[in-house]
Image (spheres, rainbow, N blue to C red):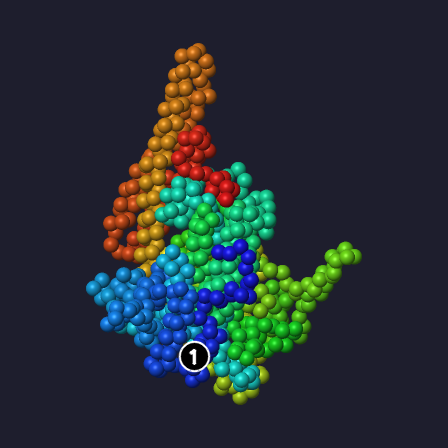
C-alpha cells in the first residue's frame, strides 16, 4: 500500500475490464463477448478459449499463479477454491501454464458442503459454478498471492440455485422484460433493456485488535454478549460526521486504495452515529456488480483492518444501547438509453410514466411487504430493527410532501393539477448564497423511502448480502409492471386507461404510505389498524417465502422454484438455531470460566477486607453491604447460568428444525438475557483490575 496514490491510475488496476478485453481480444471475439453481455446467450467454445487465454495472460502478467471461481453460496459470504495455472511439464521439464475456455466457463465445487436446505444429500456432492460474463473478473491480492477471481453462479447437479447470484440475475431479467413493456407503451422504442442499479451504503465498527482478542464473544459471535454501558455513548452526537481519527483515517486511506484497484467506486467516508462506527458509500452500479462489489467491500474492510492492528465488526448490533449498523440499499431502474424510471422530472404531477411506475411500486411493496421484510431478516438485524437509527420492522413507503400531495390529488380527483415546489432557503448571511430547497425533507425512520430519483431500502443489515433484498425488489416490481402492462396493452384508449390504473393502484395501496415518525409507538398501533404486517424476527419472517402468493410470484418469472424456496426457508431456521446456539455456548463459557471466577475472587477480597477492618476495630458496614449486593447478584448469575445450560441442551436435542429455531428465539434467548443482566450489573461494581474482559469504554473509545 503506497503513501501517495493517483486514483485515475490505480482505478480498476486489478480488474479485467471491458477496455482490457477490447485491447487483448480479436475484434470478432470481443464483439461476441459484448453481444452476450448485453443481450444474453452463450459464447462459442472457440471464443471462450480465446477469452480464457487473454484473461490468463493478463493475470499472469500481474503476478497471478492461481484462479478461482468466486461465488456466493447460501452462507451469505463468498467462496473460492484456488487452482494453479499449471499443466504437466513438457518433456524437457518446463512447466506450461494453461487456462481453457471450459475452465473459465464451468467449475465443480462440492455442493454437499454448502447450505442446501435439503436440496442436496450429503452423498450428492456434485455442483457447478458458471461464469457470470456480466461481472468482470478481478485479481485479489492477499497472503496467498494474486488470485484471478471469476465471478460465477452456483447450482446443483439437478439445476437448483444454491447461491445468491443466480436468483438475482433471474430477477434482473424479469424486471427488465416487464419494465420494457411499460416504457414501450409510452413510446420509448429505442430501449432494449432496463437495468436495476444499486448503491449500498456500508456501516461498520472498528475495534483495537488487542481488545478483540480478549473478547471471545466478539470472536465467536461477532457481538458483545456481556457489557455494561460506558459513561458516554452517542448522546452528545459529537461522533457523527466528526473529525476522523488519525488511525482510522489511515485505515480508510488504504481501504479506498484497495477498493479502487478492484474497480469499486468508493465515494463517501465518514464517522457514523455511535463511537467507533463509520460508513463507506459507493456510486451506483448494475445490481449484480453492486452485489459482487459489496462482498468485496466487506472482505477488504476486514483484511485492511488487521493491517492496522484493528478488527472490523460488521454485526448489526455489536454493542447494546448504541446505534446499530445497517446497509442502506439505494435502488433504481434505468433504460439502456438513459431514462431513469424513478425520476419525477420538474413537474411530477404531469409525468404520467413516472406516476404509473410509482403506482406499481406502491402496489408491489404493499402486496409483498412480508417478502420485503423477510429479505432484510437475519439474526443480527433482530437486535437492530426498531432501535437506534434503524427503521421499524413494519414496511411502509415514505414519499415526502410533494409526492404525497400529488398522490392525494390523484386519489381524490383522478388528476393532479399542481405540485409543491421547493423554493429558496434563505441563509440570512450576505456572503452566503441562498440555496435551492428540495420540495420535501428526508425521513430516516422510514424503511423504504423515495429520495429524489431512487428508493432507499434502509432495513438491510450491515453483514448481510444485498443479493436477497434486490432479488425481492426486482421480482415484486416485475410482477406489478406485468399486471399493469397486461391491462394497458389491451386498452382501446391508452390515456384514459393509464390514468384510471394509476388512480386504482394508488387508492387501493395508499395504506403503505407513511411520512411520519417510524420510531413512534403510535405508528405500531396505526400500522395494525391499516393491516400492515409487523414481522418482528427472522424466524417469523421465514415462512413468507413459501406462501402461495410468494411461490406464484417467483415461479411466474422463473426466479425461484418451490423447492428452492422451501430450501431457503429451512436454511433460515438452521442458520438462526446455529447462531443462537453459538451465542449461548459462548455466554456459558464466558460466564463459567471468566466472569463468575473473577467475581468470586472479588468477594474473597471483600470478605478478607471485612475481617481485617473488624479485627482492627473499624466500621466494616460499607464493605459488608457491598459483599451482600455482589453475592446476591453472583447467585442470580449462577442460577441463570445453570438454567441456560439446561435450556440450551434441550434446544440442541430438538430434531424439528423449525420448532428448534422458535425454541431458541422464545426460550434460549430469554434465558441469555437473564444471565446477562446480573453480569452487567456486576461489571459496574467489581474492581476494574479484577474484571476479566475489556469494557464498552475501552472497546469503543480506544481505537
Quick check: 459 left or right of 452? left
Image coords of residue 308 (percent x, y): 47, 49
- At 52% from the left and 61% from the top, the residue drawn is 266
Quick check: 118 left or right of 163? left
The outermost residue toward the right is 430
Q: Is residue 549 visible?
A: no
Q: Which of 136 and 691 is in front in this view?
A: 136
The outermost residue toward the bottom is 492
SS at mark 1 in the image: loop
Q: Nearer the viewer, residue 552 or 332?
A: 332
> Which residue position is annotated with label 1?
25
Image coords of residue 630 (percent x, y): 40, 28
Q: Nearer the viewer, residue 175 or 266?
A: 266
Q: Can residue 590 be seen in this view?
A: yes
Image coords of residue 381 (percent x, y): 43, 54
- At 38% from the left and 26% from the top, the residue drawn is 603
- At 24% from the left and 49% from the top, the residue drawn is 653
- At 58% from the left and 83% from the top, the residue drawn is 495
The outermost residue toward the left is 123
Q: In this view, does 311 lie above or below 170?
A: above
Q: Residues within 10 Å of mark 1 (few under 14, many from 20)?
A: some
Quick check: 112 left or right of 480? left
Amino acid at each position: 500500500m503506497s503513501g501517495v496514490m493517483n486514483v485515475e491510475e490505480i482505478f480498476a488496476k486489478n480488474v479485467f475490464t471491458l477496455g482490457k478485453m477490447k485491447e487483448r481480444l480479436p475484434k470478432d471475439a470481443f464483439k461476441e463477448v459484448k453481444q452476450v453481455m448485453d443481450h444474453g446467450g452463450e459464447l462459442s467454445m472457440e471464443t471462450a478459449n480465446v477469452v480464457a487465454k487473454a484473461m490468463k495472460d493478463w493475470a499472469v502478467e500481474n503476478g497471478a499463479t492461481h484462479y478461482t471461481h468466486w461465488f456466493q453460496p447460501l452462507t451469505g459470504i463468498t467462496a473460492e477454491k484456488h487452482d494453479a495455472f499449471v499443466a504437466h511439464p513438457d518433456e524437457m521439464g518446463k512447466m506450461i501454464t494453461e487456462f481453457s475456455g471450459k475452465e473459465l466457463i464451468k467449475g465443480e465445487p462440492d455442493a454437499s458442503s454448502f447450505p442446501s436446505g435439503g436440496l442436496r444429500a450429503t452423498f450428492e456432492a456434485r455442483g457447478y459454478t458458471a461464469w457470470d460474463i456480466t461481472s468482470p473478473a478481478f485479481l485479489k491480492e492477499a497472503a496467498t498471492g494474486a488470485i484471478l477471481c471469476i465471478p460465477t453462479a452456483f447450482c446443483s447437479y439437478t439445476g437448483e440455485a444454491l447461491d445468491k447470484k443466480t436468483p438475482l440475475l433471474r430477477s434482473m431479467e424479469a424486471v427488465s422484460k416487464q419494465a420494457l413493456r411499460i416504457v414501450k407503451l409510452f413510446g420509448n422504442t429505442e430501449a432494449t433493456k432496463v437495468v436495476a442499479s444499486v448503491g449500498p451504503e456500508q456501516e461498520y465498527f472498528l475495534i483495537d485488535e488487542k481488545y478483540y482478542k480478549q473478547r471471545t464473544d466478539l470472536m465467536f459471535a461477532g457481538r458483545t454478549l456481556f457489557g455494561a454501558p460506558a459513561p458516554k455513548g452517542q448522546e452528545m452526537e459529537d461522533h457523527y460526521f466528526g473529525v476522523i481519527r488519525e488511525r482510522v483515517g489511515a485505515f480508510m486511506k488504504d481501504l479506498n486504495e484497495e477498493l479502487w484497484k478492484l474497480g469499486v467506486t468508493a465515494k463517501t467516508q465518514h464517522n457514523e452515529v455511535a463511537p467507533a462506527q463509520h460508513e463507506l458509500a459507493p456510486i451506483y452500479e448494475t445490481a449484480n456488480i453492486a452485489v459482487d462489489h459489496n462482498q468485496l467491500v466487506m472482505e477488504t474492510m476486514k483484511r485492511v483492518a488487521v493491517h492496522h492492528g484493528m478488527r472490523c465488526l460488521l454485526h448489526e448490533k455489536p454493542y447494546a444501547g448504541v446505534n446499530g449498523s445497517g446497509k442502506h440499499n439505494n435502488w433504481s431502474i434505468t433504460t439502456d438509453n438513459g431514462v431513469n424510471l424513478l425520476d419525477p422530472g420538474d413537474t411530477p404531477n404531469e409525468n404520467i410514466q413516472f406516476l404509473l411506475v410509482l403506482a406499481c411500486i406502491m402496489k408491489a411493496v404493499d402486496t409483498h411487504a412480508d417478502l420485503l421484510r423477510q429479505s432484510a431478516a437475519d439474526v443480527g438485524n433482530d437486535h437492530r430493527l426498531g432501535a437506534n437509527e434503524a427503521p421499524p420492522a413494519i414496511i411502509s413507503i415514505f414519499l415526502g410532501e410533494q409526492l404525497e400531495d400529488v398522490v392525494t390529488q390523484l386519489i381524490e380527483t383522478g388528476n393532479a393539477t399542481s405540485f409543491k415546489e421547493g423554493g429558496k432557503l434563505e441563509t440570512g448571511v450576505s456572503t452566503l448564497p441562498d440555496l435551492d430547497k428540495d420540495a420535501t425533507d428526508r425521513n430516516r425512520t422510514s424503511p423504504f423511502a423515495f429520495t429524489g430519483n431512487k428508493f432507499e431500502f434502509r432495513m438491510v443489515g450491515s453483514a448481510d448480502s444485498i443479493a436477497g433484498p434486490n432479488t425481492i425488489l426486482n421480482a415484486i416490481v416485475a410482477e406489478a409492471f406485468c399486471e399493469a402492462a397486461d391491462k394497458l396493452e389491451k386498452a382501446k384508449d391508452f390515456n384514459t386507461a393509464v390514468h384510471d390504473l394509476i388512480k386504482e393502484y394508488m387508492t387501493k395501496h395508499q395504506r403503505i404510505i407513511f411520512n411520519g415518525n417510524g420510531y413512534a409507538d403510535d405508528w405500531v398501533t396505526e400500522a395494525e389498524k391499516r393491516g400492515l404486517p409487523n414481522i418482528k424476527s427472522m424466524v417469523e419472517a421465514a415462512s413468507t417465502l413459501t406462501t402461495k402468493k410468494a411461490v406464484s410470484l417467483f415461479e411466474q418469472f422463473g426466479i425461484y422454484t418451490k423447492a428452492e424456496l422451501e430450501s431457503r426457508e429451512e436454511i433460515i431456521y438452521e442458520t438462526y438455531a446455529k447462531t443462537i446456539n453459538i451465542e449461548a455456548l459462548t455466554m456459558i463459557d464466558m460466564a463459567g470460566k471468566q466472569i463468575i471466577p473473577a467475581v468470586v475472587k472479588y468477594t474473597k477480597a471483600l470478605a478478607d477486607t471485612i475481617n481485617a477492618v473488624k479485627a482492627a476495630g473499624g466500621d466494616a458496614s460499607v464493605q459488608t453491604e457491598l459483599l451482600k449486593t455482589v453475592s446476591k447478584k453472583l447467585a442470580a448469575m449462577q442460577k441463570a447460568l445453570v438454567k441456560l445450560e439446561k435450556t440450551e441442551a434441550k434446544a440442541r436435542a430438538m430434531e424439528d428444525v423449525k420448532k428448534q429455531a422458535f425454541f431458541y428465539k422464545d426460550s434460549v434467548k430469554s434465558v441469555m438475557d437473564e444471565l446477562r443482566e446480573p453480569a452487567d450489573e456486576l461489571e459496574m461494581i467489581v474492581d476494574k483490575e479484577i474484571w476479566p474482559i475489556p469494557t464498552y469504554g475501552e472497546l469503543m473509545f480506544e481505537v
